[in-house]
Amino acid sequence: MFRGRRGRLTAGLLLLEALVAVQSLVVATILPDIRRDLGMVELYGLVFAASSLATIASIPITGRAVDALGSRRVLPPVLFLFTGGLLVAATAPAMPVLLVGQFLIGAGGGGLYALSLGTVAKAFPDRLRPRVMALLATMWILPGLFGPPFAAFAATTVGWRWAFAAPLPLVLTGWALIAPALDVVPSPEGGRDTHLQLRWPLQLMVGAGLFLTAITIVRPWALGVVALGAAVGIPALRRIVPEGTFLAAPGRPAAAASAFLLSAGFLAMDAFLTLMLTDVRGLTLGQASVAITAASVAWAIGSLWQSGRADRVALPRLLRVGTLLVLVGQVAVTVTLVQSVPLVWAFAGWALVGVGMGISFPTIPLATMRVSEAGEESGQLSSVLLLDFLGVAAGAGLAGGAVATSEAFGEPLAWGIAGAFAIGLAALLVLLWTAGRIPDRPPDDPPPTP
């Protein structure tokens, strides 16, 4: 993995992952401070959803673009979007402008994600892919250790805006390191159709945006917007995802459905964890950031454990093990909404969630890579990645709707967060069933060694 030109490619992919990891963890940490500064708590969940909505469009577009045009031509516009989002978020005077910044960050980050995993599928053999995926997960360790504390320090000293501005020099550094390494990726075959279908990803983004925005607004007219969003988004989604995804049919459809459920279950709690710890249980932002840091380290540990077993243990079994750990950990966090329950349950539970996500999260794209057709890896993988980020948007948006509804009826914040956590737990329970239907390996491959 670290020899010759492929080694430079590995280093470039790790830098991309670290850059996205820093931004993701920083936003999760400083969002309570942003809410206190900019207000509009009803848009709290949409800060995560805005980023994910842009990703919904950028992932399938980028995946197909990598197949058709090659990684080298796709990287510059993706980095441009990411940089622009950081600048807009850092200078946002109000929460709606911050949502625009998060949208651009999501478009760039989603493109980087699709480009990275598509490159892994094209440039690395199956025996190396689990190790590369594990290395990508370890790139969350240093951001997990230093990102949340840095964000908390910046928010309480120079201001939360610097948490968005600080990563900007890394983008230029990343470009200088990554561009030369992309030569190792096979070039697109001659005669391949270079037409990129933009209609369905953009239509899905609009429909999902209408749906997820309306569920955070507790007004009678919002029900009509919810229905309109579903009417616009569902037909587009059917055009993009593998046939049978809505029923979790065995194979790639089940992998896509599982990606959605895993991300929705995780984000429904992740989006409101720091808010629960600070505004319900009374911790400082710095104290709450310890939970995010611990989960980041645990995630990398789980991914390293998974990488040593992915070629020996059936992938459906690995996904079920990881999902069960996430479920148990989230139950432990949920009970700490009760004031008499020691907060150690929340920190230990969230660390267990990190281990489970480290096992589950890379297992789904690995399963998809094993059954992808040569030359179509990025495009076929992008449909699964799309459902992953749609799950992020749905989990954060639905959880935000639970909190907004609670506030509209004058109920305590803890009740709304409890509803958000319940949404996540329900998604994970369904995932325990779909996990057994994901692909393991092509039919002509031998079974794993016991």
Image: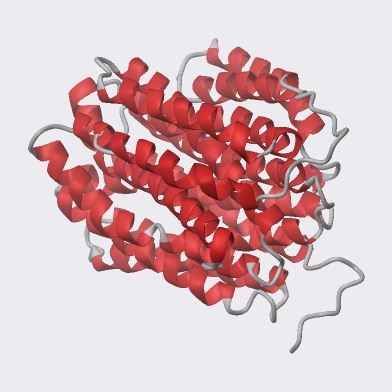
Residue positioned most to the bottom: 450
Q: Is residue 408 visible?
A: no
Who is closer to the viewer here, 392 or 1?
1
In x, y percent, where is residue 319? 64, 66
Q: Is residue 389 above or below residue 329?
A: above
Image quadrant in which the N terminus is located: bottom right
Instruction: Give the image quarter of residue 63.
Output: top right
Q: Is residue 365 above or below residue 243?
A: below
In x, y percent, where is residue 54? 54, 27
Residue at left offset 60%, top offset 14%: 225
Residue at left offset 27%, top offset 44%: 29
Q: Is residue 72 above or below residue 360?
A: above
| Left or right: 330, with 246 as reference point | left
| Left or right: 245, with 56 as reference point | right
| Left or right: 208, with 439 as reference point | left
Q: How is the image coloured?
A: secondary structure
In x, y percent, where is residue 100? 41, 19
Instruction: Give the image quarter of residue 200.
Output: top right
Who is closer to the viewer here, 441 or 406?
441
How many numbered marks are there?
Answer: 0
Residue positioned most to the top: 221
Residue at left offset 79%, top offset 49%: 253
Q: Is residue 35 visible?
A: yes
Residue positioned most to the right: 444
In x, y percent, where is residue 366? 68, 61
Image quadrant in which the C terminus is located: bottom right
Instruction: Give the image quarter of residue 114.
Output: top right
